[in-house]
Image (cartoon, rainbow, N blue to C red):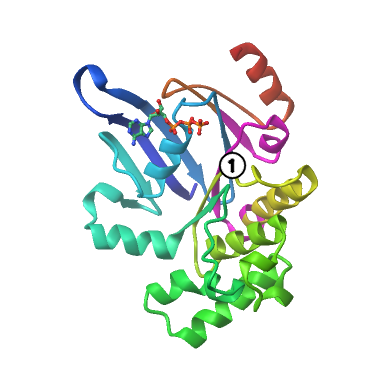
Amino acid sequence: MNVILDIRNLTRTHGQGEQAVHALRGVDLAVPAGELVAVMGPSGSGKSTLLTCAGGLDQPTSGEVLVDGNDLATLSRNAVAALRRRRIGYVFQDFNLIPALTAAENVALPLELDGTRSRTAHKYAEAALAEVAIGDLADRFPDDMSGGQRQRVAIARAIVGERRLLLADEPTGALDSETGEAVLQLLRDRCDQHGIAGVLVTHDARHAAWADRVVYLRDGVLVGQSGPLSDADALLQESH
Ligand SMILES: Nc1ncnc2c1ncn2[C@@H]1O[C@H](COP(=O)(O)OP(=O)(O)OP(=O)(O)O)[C@@H](O)[C@H]1O
């Protein structure tokens, strides 16, 4: 099994002493290529922290995070940044697109930051936009797009190049339900067709139903996991 994301006994504590907040307390999670895992749990249970640690945007207090075989703690800051640009894609609720750049420029940016020549980066960007079915909007600016189109640009940016891990934090939060479903279908297809490992944070059991597996966080602890769909409903009901 080709494990892309391997999280071992991960803890993350913010602050110290009486003020300490234990955002994650000993989480284990392994996600192989091709698998989409949904992370559910109440507000404050540690879902976003799990994602930021997985993506090298936050450092664990203890435990290990391996991405594509690389233990993030053993890498220099520059090496982690390079791994993030090359292998890890993020999709956030609020898209995080740069308004002054066109769709293609937004998507090409991580590659250009990584030293890819502009023309090559733009070719990759156009291919990624075509894959998410908005190839014709390459020259459009984010402000002139619908929410669904903007989220497609964000997904194109997250999959451009040779990404191995796709991290999505409430990616459909700002979208109507039909557009949201289409975005999830795209994430699902990426995992199925390109062997990407995906982690999706969601509050919505219908969205979690797109995943192969649902894990449930409570107070920083993984309290359960289930197969897809109907099992997730049962798990949620038990947890309330
Ligand atoms: N930078 C920080 N400093 C202090 N506490 C933090 C920080 N970041 C997160 N926390 C705390 O860690 C806990 C977990 O937060 P996190 O955002 O991971 O939860 P979440 O499950 O994603 O919540 P939500 O569903 O509301 O987004 C919360 O108690 C939060 O207040």
> Within the displayed image, which quadrant is ligand 1 positioned in?
top left
Residue 123 drawn above or below residue 11: below
For residue 107, side relative to residue 7 (left or right) = right
Q: Residues within 10 Å of mark 1 (few under 14, many from 20)?
A: some
Q: Which residues are magenta?
A: 191-215
Q: Which residue position is annotated with label 1?
A: 170
The quadrant of the image that shows the C terminus is top right
Residue displayed at 54% across by 68% down: 160
Which amino acid does the dot numbered 1 rest on? Answer: Glu
Task: Report the front residue among 58 and 3.
Answer: 58
Image location (x, y in percent) of residue 219: 43, 20
Does mark 1's beta carbon lie closer than 8 Å to ligand 1? yes
Residue displayed at 34% across by 64% down: 82
Task: Report the front residue among 152 and 212.
Answer: 152
Magenta segment includes 201? yes
- Which residue in the rendered view is the most extreme toward the right? 178
Task: Report the front residue among 89 and 174.
Answer: 174
Residue displayed at 57% across by 55% down: 95
For residue 114, side relative to residue 145 (left or right) = left
- Which residue in the rendered view is the most extreme toward the left? 17
Q: Secondary structure at mark 1?
A: loop
Magenta segment includes 174? no
The image quarter containing residue 9 is: top left
Residue 35 drawn above or below residue 21: below
The image quarter containing residue 205 is: top right
Image location (x, y in percent) of residue 190: 63, 57
Image location (x, y in percent) of residue 220: 41, 24
Residue 200 drawn above or below residue 99: above
Image location (x, y in percent) of residue 62: 25, 33
Q: How many marks?
A: 1
